[in-house]
Amino acid sequence: MSYASEATPGRGNEDYVVAGPGWVAVLDGATARPGVESGCVHDPAWLVRRLGAELGARLVLENRTPLMDLLADSIKGVRELHASTCDLDNPDSPSSTVALLRRAADRVEWLVLADSPVLLDLGDEVRVVRDGRVDELPSYTDEAVRAARNQPGGFWVASTKPEAAYEALAGELSIDRVRRAALLSDGAARLVERFGRIGWTELFDLLDHAGPREVIRRTREAEATETLLRGKRYDDATAVLVRF
């Protein structure tokens, strides 16, 4: 396994990678929008590190527990860490995406919550597992996003509601079908999804031959030269490659 993670220039990194023998997770904290009151004394960087620690502790010890259950218990664990200091009923509480991969005997298991994708190289195709519900909102005002976050008919993220884990996309394949896997924060996936510089197969080959750091370098190059600015120019970027 190899990985690289880089913050938005001039800011702290709100992405986080946690890994152990046979498993890896990428978390991407949602950057707080100016003027939005989260009701929490902590920032997204705090959340992703605590959630990564909770996930890691469970993945080390509970190899047969379903991934959704592990994530739900981890969200609950983080919730308990700041229940006495923060308003956890505030829908703008810090949140994170989750991309999770685990090898369990002869199977490869994955879980994706929100828009940090897991890619599976199956030889004759690249399977992209990405939860795109956040892309389908009718409006992206602060009020509309707040109303849709962790609500039926909206989109789901890891924040203060353990039940969000059961809204994730999850699946498994026989390990002999999977050549390689990749986990990306949306800041690294944008090299394909936003800029269209390469396709998913080419991204795999770039990860394999030049490494995750090169994926991020090319992403920064694309960000710096974009002429039609949509949303934030730069984003935290994380890329993980797993070989089987």
Image: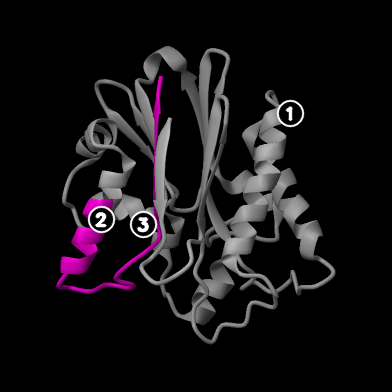
**Mark pair 1, 3: CA separation:** 31 Å
Secondary structure type for disc 2: helix
Can residue 183 be seen at all in this image of the molecule? Answer: no
- Three-letter amino acid code at disc 3? Gly
Can residue 129 be seen at all in this image of the molecule? Answer: yes
**Mark pair 2, 3: CA separation:** 8 Å
Residue marked by disc 1: 61
Give the image location of residue 64, x and y in percent.
69, 23
Secondary structure type for disc 1: helix
Residue marked by disc 2: 219
Q: Earlier in the sequence, mark 2 or mark 1?
A: 1
- Three-letter amino acid code at disc 1? Leu
Magenta-span inclusion, residue 241: yes
Q: Is residue 65 above or below residue 82?
A: above
Start-end of magenta stretch = 217-244
- Left or right of 191: which side holds 235? right
- Three-letter amino acid code at disc 2? Thr
Residue marked by disc 3: 187
Q: Who's the residue at 74% across and 69% down the image?
A: 88
Magenta-span inclusion, residue 117: no
Q: Are marks 2 and 3 in contact (CB under 8 Å)?
A: yes
